[in-house]
Amino acid sequence: MSHDPDDEVPAGAAVPVDMILNGARRHADVPTNTMLLSLLRNEFGLTGVRGSCERGVCGVCTVLLDGKPVASCSLFAFDVDGATVETIEGQRDGDALGPVQQAFAECGGFQCGYCTPGMIILTTALLRSEAKPNRDEIRRWIGSNICRCTGYEMIMESVERAAETLAAESGEPGEDPDTEGEEERS
Ligand code: FES
Ligand code: FES
């Protein structure tokens, strides 16, 4: 982040913001009161990033900032200057769905889909830090994001399916973390 908080910026002035957004360099001049959510949707057209509570509570607007999930409604756009940002639009694998997106589609991890971009981004962060999360870890991780209609069971199944897919793609065995180490039943 290159902006010094002690720098005097006149009220209403635009400040330059440069970032790596879904792998590409992007630039914008934004008023100092612009939130990251607004920059992504209104300036860059990334409308897969949703807004709901706009108070940092529901998780719908989650994006990755330098690999960490953050609420884009609660961050000033100028605060991401110099950072790497990933949104749901960066999850695609060429013309196909990415593995986490595919897992949510296969396991019914959404109904209205409003929470889904944030859930998928959150899942991506989880699986980068823990390739085989168990149920408790998944439950704790996704608990920060609110889904109003699916029920979390299918979301957890989606996360597990994504973990299996990613493990298979990387050549890992992809064992069920809840049964790992159990004796094989006869
Ligand atoms: S819209 Fe950002 S946390 Fe709810
Ligand atoms: S699928 Fe509707 S809010 Fe989650």
Image: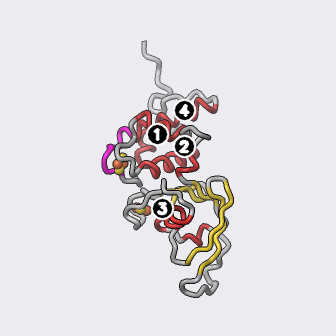
Q: Residue at x 55, y 40 (%)?
A: 98
Residue 12 falls in image quadrant = bottom right
Answer with the quadrant where ligand 1 appears in the image.
Answer: bottom left
The local secondary structure at tag 3 comes to: strand
Whichever of labels 3 and 2 marks the residue nearer the N terminus, that label is: 3
- Magenta span of residues: 147-154
Please state which of residues 13 and 159 is positioned toward the viewer in this rendering: 13
The total of numbered circles placed on residues is 4
Cα gap from disc 1 to disc 4, whole angstroms: 10 Å
Q: Which mark is residue 127?
A: 2
Q: Which mark is residue 159?
A: 1
Tell me which numbered mark, 3 or 1, is placed earlier along the sequence.
3
Would the CB of label 3 be found within 8 Å of ligand 1? yes
Residue type for callout 1: Val
Point 46% across, 58% down: residue:
61
Q: Left or right: 22 with respect to 88?
A: right
Label 4 with label 3: CB-CB less than 8 Å: no
The residue sitting at 60% across, 67% down in the picture is: 80
In the image, is the residue at mark 1 within 8 Å of ligand 2 by its beta carbon?
no
Q: Indicate the amino acid at tag 3.
A: Ala
Are circles 2 and 1 on residues that touch, CB within 8 Å?
yes
Quick one: SS at disc 1? Answer: helix
Residue 82 appears at what percent x and percent y?
Answer: 67, 66
| Residue at the (43%, 48%) spot, across then down | 116
Q: How is the image coloured?
A: secondary structure
Residue annotated with mark 4:
165
Whichever of callouts 4 and 2 sits on the residue coming sooner in the sequence is 2
Disc 2 is placed on an element classified as helix
Under circle 4, the secondary element is: helix
Residue 164 vs residue 53, the one in the foreground: 53
Query: Residue 36 — which label?
Result: none
